[in-house]
């Protein structure tokens, strides 16, 4: 979410990162739809990270398996870019972090060390998620997504 971008920019600027890679699909299935990668990168550029450090990876619209598609798009960029890297940190929001972490680690394989940074949740107060309909829904959805992903990864062979 756009509300989490200032924190992403702060983390990027305070770390020893070479690139801030933004991966996003089209906003909707329309051919001329903007994509989230460009929208986020435009906002991030205003927040301080140098334009030449931000990499935009636009993907086609995805309605399911977005995290897996994002990880595959990132891997394709890493392999084609010639950027020699062994380690990445995935920045995402809230309870989605664990699913993102296992998905990226599975797609990238053992040649990469994958870390995850869970940015602050902005759509509900995580301290009171149990009494928030939005919090309950997101925790339940991401827990089921995490379990599904663990099961799917066990059955799927990801090409290196």
Image: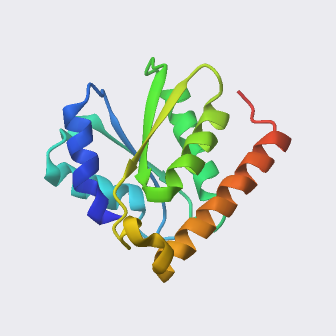
Instruction: Please indicate, yes or no, whether residue 80 appears anywhere in the rendered image.
Output: yes
Name which residue lies at 47% across and 79% down: 131
Image quarter where the N terminus lies is bottom left
**Left or right placement of residue 155 versus residue 66 in this view:** right
Give residue 59's position: percent from left, percent from top. 52, 54
Relative to residue 148, is residue 11 drawn left or right?
Answer: left
Q: Position of residue 12 (x, y in %)?
A: 26, 37
**Residue nearest the observer in this picture, 131 or 59:** 131
From the viewer's perspective, tell me whether residue 112 is left or right of residue 146: left
The residue shown at (15%, 54%) is 46
Nearer-the-camera pick, 147 or 74: 147
> Disc count in the image?
0
In the current view of this chain or complex, which residue is farthest to the bottom?
133
Q: Give residue 8's position: percent from left, percent from top.
A: 29, 48
Residue visible at 55% across and 23% down in the picture: 112
Q: Residue at x 25, y 51 (%)?
A: 7
């Amino acid at each position: 979410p756009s509300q989490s971008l200032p924190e992403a920019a702060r983390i990027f600027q305070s770390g020893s990162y070479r690139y801030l890679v933004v991966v996003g699909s089209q906003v909707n299935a329309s051919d001329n739809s903007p994509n989230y990668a460009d929208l986020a990168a435009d906002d991030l550029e205003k927040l301080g990270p140098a334009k030449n450090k931000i990499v935009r990876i636009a993907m086609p619209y995805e309605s399911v398996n977005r995290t897996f598609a994002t990880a595959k798009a990132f891997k394709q960029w890493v392999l084609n870019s010639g950027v020699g890297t062994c380690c990445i940190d995935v920045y995402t929001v809230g309870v989605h972090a664990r699913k993102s972490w296992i998905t990226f680690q599975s797609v990238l394989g053992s040649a990469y060390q994958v870390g995850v940074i869970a940015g602050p949740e902005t759509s509900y107060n995580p301290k009171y998620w149990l009494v928030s309909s939005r919090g309950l829904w997101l925790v339940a959805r991401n827990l089921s997504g995490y379990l599904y992903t663990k099961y799917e990864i066990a059955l799927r062979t990801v090409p290196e």
